Amino acid sequence: MKKLTPEVKKLLINFIGFCVFFSIIAFSLEKGIAYFVTLSGDSQTGKVNLIMEHKIDSDVMIFGSSVAEVGFNSNVIESNLNKSVYNLAIDGTPILKSEFLIDEFLSYSEKCDTIMIGLAFFSFSKMQEMNEPGRYLAHKSNKYLKENIRKVAPELHAKLYNVPFYSFIVADHTYYKNAYLGLKNVINKKTFYGNQEKGFSVHDETYYDTRSTDGLKMDIEFSEKVIERFKRVVEKIKSHNITPILIITPMHINGQSFYNNYKEYTNIAKDISEKTNTRLIDFSKSNITKEDKYFYNNGHLNKLGALTFSKNVCDSIATNPQTPQKVYVKQK
């Protein structure tokens, strides 16, 4: 075997030294950015941080996607139920894509007695990829998050946990913005404990029909695997002596008519309710769904709609406090 010349040896040593130095810098930068992101209270990342940093433990917690985020007015529910309430629904993120938040919350909560889960037509559809990884990337070492990613996005899991510094590829401008906001909080010695709306997102907008103009309808694709996983999430909540309440959020009748099998979605929710002995409040046929004034598009309530919907949720709970299964809401 030919011996290396002194020049080649020196070059090789320098190259190895540079790689080690670069790795140390990159590792420190990755950890430093992640740390400051965890100190941000902004928007969706702030909600994730509230749970992952154990900064929130209300009597009533609300989970779900954007339809829950814009539909459940925390302050209205709080004043009607006389309990502390926080809306942890994450935009674009069905329950099984944010299961890690429920797992982490259950691991430390001492106060919560009720978890409301806002359902949407896609709640039981096949889960593909994780939405907006930058929202939770700073907590990638969390065991619940790691498992959640493995179940929903195995390709992302393989890269994120095996490719060095893959976080820099996944991160977007929002991630770095939150790092900056977290740094500002450190400089200003400011801590975050949620916002004035308690996680509720206000949309004071008028209705716009978002149906396709070609008149074609679609089928909602359901997944038996997702349905079974959803049942396990419900049972997991109950095992921590917390009462889960499933709530089919209002969808405008125009939106419902766009799907050939919308009724199948509500039937699946009812079946889950029965099989897990869990209360279901169904707003799919509520008068709310027939009024444009309550929506800003076919799937999302506006400010007035959220106010009306939230009051009706409270009325249903107050008039049926011990009902373990289905409650069907009919508005006056």
Image: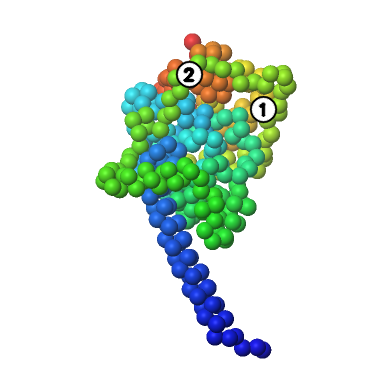
Separation of marks 2 and 1 at Cα, in angstroms: 30 Å
159 and 187: which is toward the camera: 187
Looking at the rendered structure, the kind of residue marked 2 is Glu
Q: Is 4 situated left or right of 303 in this image?
A: right
Q: What residue type is labelled 1?
A: Glu
Q: Is residue 27 above or below residue 236?
A: below
Q: Which residue is drawn at 44% across and 46% down?
A: 176
Mark 2 or 1, closer to the camera: 2
Q: Where is residue 35 in the image (x, y as percent from the top left)?
A: 39, 52
x and y percentages locating residue 279 in the rendered image: 51, 30
Residue 264, labelled with which disc? Answer: 1
Query: Nearest the camera: 278 or 228?
Result: 228
Using residue 77 as the reference point, say whether residue 101 is left or right of it: right
**Relative to the observer, which residue lies in front, 240 or 292?**
292
The image position of residue 216, as x and y in percent, is 73, 22
Q: Could you say which disc has been placed on residue 205 in the image?
A: 2
